[in-house]
Amino acid sequence: MENVVELTNVSKKFKDFSVKNINLEVKKGFITGFIGANGAGKSTTIKMMMNLLRPDVGEIKIFGLDYMKHEKAIKERIGFVYDGNVFFEGLNLKDIKRIVGPAYKRWDDALFHQYLEKFELPLNKQIKTFSKGMQMKASLAIALSHHAELIIMDEPTAGLDPIFRRELLDLLQELMVDGDRTIFFSTHITSDLDRIADYIALIQKGELLFNQSILDVVENYALVKGRLELLDRDTEQAFIHVHRALTGFEALTDNIKGVQKIFGDTVAIDQASLEEIMYYMKGAFLLEGFSGT
């Protein structure tokens, strides 16, 4: 299976934060959800993917190419959708088209107008009059109008109302029908990905904890609930992280068969949501120092 993005042993150190030894693959023709709490390293990783930051060590390839020799060719094929307005507020979409269009060899004027009509965006109103949702739609229309093969979205649904968020997710699914487009979707709102993601990558405190297909995530991770007296030093080894309460315990595991063997039918085992996985992974990382795979 072809990789559109490959990060190999990528690290970037700042004064009070580091992204460490990231190994990440983004598969062609699929939606990869990039999840993690605010400050986990999502935006830093994306900036390195966009060549807005250079890694201290490691290798980044986009479409099998490196930025040192092929930056223009790579960026011709990428569309970026950001959380917020990236255009001068006094401009309208007609002005933006006149500025942005000539920068891309494959800019499609007719397609741009089709998306403006589909998204119900005015051509002559200033960007500063647009709602947050309209600004996001404008960024997406521009990304699609130069036939971007890789669309990178950094927290695109943050601050949007639930109805518009659902409309956006439906639209992204429509865009994936032909199999030629790849979407990398960064968010801390994990419910956005439960319906549309094919792969999930989880980052915590600058470390990539896993990068798996959504099917593997569903099959591998579970939430276990039981009585406190079932826990001891040995039985807790079956869990990534345990939360205790007066009424019992709740724990995340990636070893469902092991839990079944140890506890039998004395515990309840339920599918873990992405939000629960992220929450318990964070607890394990903070308390124990988690080593991801």
Image (cartoon, rainbow, N blue to C red):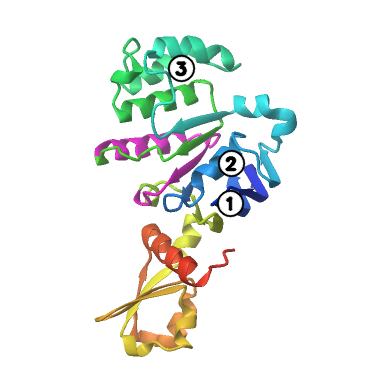
The answer to which image quadrant residue 6 occupies is top right
In screen coordinates, is 194 left or right of 16?
A: left
Residue at x 67% of width, y 28% of height: 71
Residue at x 53% of width, y 69% of height: 289
Residue at x 35% of width, y 40% of height: 158
Q: Nearer the viewer, residue 131 or 41?
A: 41
Residue at x 58% of width, y 45% of height: 27
Q: Residues within 10 Å of mark 3 (few under 14, many from 20)?
A: some
Q: Which mark lies nearer to you, 1 or 3?
A: 1
The answer to which image quadrant residue 208 occupies is bottom right
Q: Residues within 10 Å of mark 1 (few under 14, many from 20)?
A: many
Extent of the magenta region: 163-191
Three-letter amino acid code at the position of disc 3: Leu
State the SS at label 3.
helix
Three-letter amino acid code at the position of disc 1: Val
Q: Please state the horizontal and vertical placement of residue 252, each as a whole percent of the image.
A: 41, 71
State the SS at label 2.
loop
Q: Relative to residue 81, is residue 20 depicted above or below?
A: below
**Residue 269 in sight from this viewpoint:** yes
Give the spatial CA distance, label 3 vs label 2: 23 Å
Name the residue carrying label 2: 28
Q: Residues within 10 Å of mark 2 (few under 14, many from 20)?
A: many
Name the residue carrying label 1: 19
Q: Which mark is residue 80?
A: none
The tag earlier along the polypeptide, 3 or 2, is: 2
Q: Which mark is residue 111?
A: 3
- Check whether the beta carbons of the residues at disc 1 and disc 2 lie within 8 A of each other: no
**Residue 220 in sight from this viewpoint:** no
